[in-house]
Image (spheres, grey):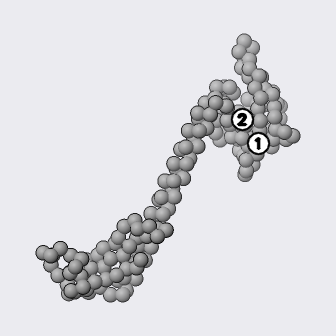
Amino acid sequence: RHAAFHNGADASPLLRQDAPRQNVLTCPILVSDQLLGMIVALAPGDCPFSTADAKLATAVASQAAIAFGRARSHQEAERERQKLREVVANHPDGIVVLDAAGTTLLQNPIARQLCQADDVLRKLHEQLPGASPASLCAGNGEHELVLGAAAAQRFVQMKARAIGNGDVVLT
């Protein structure tokens, strides 16, 4: 769990038999008690390691552990974001997320096909004049829309729900 230094004969068991006489400093890199690696430093036999060297190695190992932990968290978050993107993209219903200002933040392929617009709020204004993300959520948040040209019109039931920070999801 801590740095250890082995000077002189104490270092011999850690080295190959044919290695020159050296001193060895080792320090584990731990994240949540899981060993991710080791810092190993070698010094010539006439340059022994000290407690200060062990403290420095411990500080470096601690910073490395923090960096590894953050990288791992970032990778896990990215995997979850990718999974969410795939679920939304492949969902059989249209899904749109608007921010509080009405900017379209996310729109899956089904919603894009139904709305035939990148600016979903502007498209909604055609049938719901003056609609805002907040007003869409008023009452039960349900709205019936008619989408498409005359020959290909579709009646669509839309549900609006606030999801935080003023963002609204439309399904």
Can residue 56 be seen? no
Query: Tags 1 and 2 in contact by the CB under 8 Å rule?
Result: yes
Going 56% across and 47% down the picture, which residue do you hit?
81
Against 96, residue 145 (above or below) is above
Q: Quadrant of the C terminus?
A: top right
Give the secondary structure at mark 2.
loop
Q: Position of residue 28 (x, y in %)?
A: 38, 73
Identity of the amino acid at label 1? Arg
Can residue 84 be seen? yes
Measure the C-alpha gap from mark 1 to mark 2.
9 Å
Residue found at the far right of this picture: 139
Q: Badge 2 local density, few (<14 within 10 Å), some, or many (20+)? A: some
Left or right: where does residue 109 sit relative to residue 42? right
Q: Quadrant of residue 1?
A: bottom left
Q: Quadrant of residue 68?
A: bottom left
Question: Circle 2 sits on which residue?
Answer: 171
State which tag comes first along the sequence, 1 or 2.
1
Going 68% across and 40% down the picture, which residue do you hit?
97
Q: Position of residue 40 (x, y in %)?
A: 30, 73
Q: Position of residue 4 (x, y in %)?
A: 34, 81
Identity of the amino acid at label 2? Thr
* Of residues 104 and 114, the one drawn nearer to the viewer in this rendering: 114
Question: Circle 1 sits on which residue?
Answer: 161
Q: Position of residue 170 (x, y in %)?
A: 73, 37
Going 55% across and 43% down the picture, which residue do you hit?
83
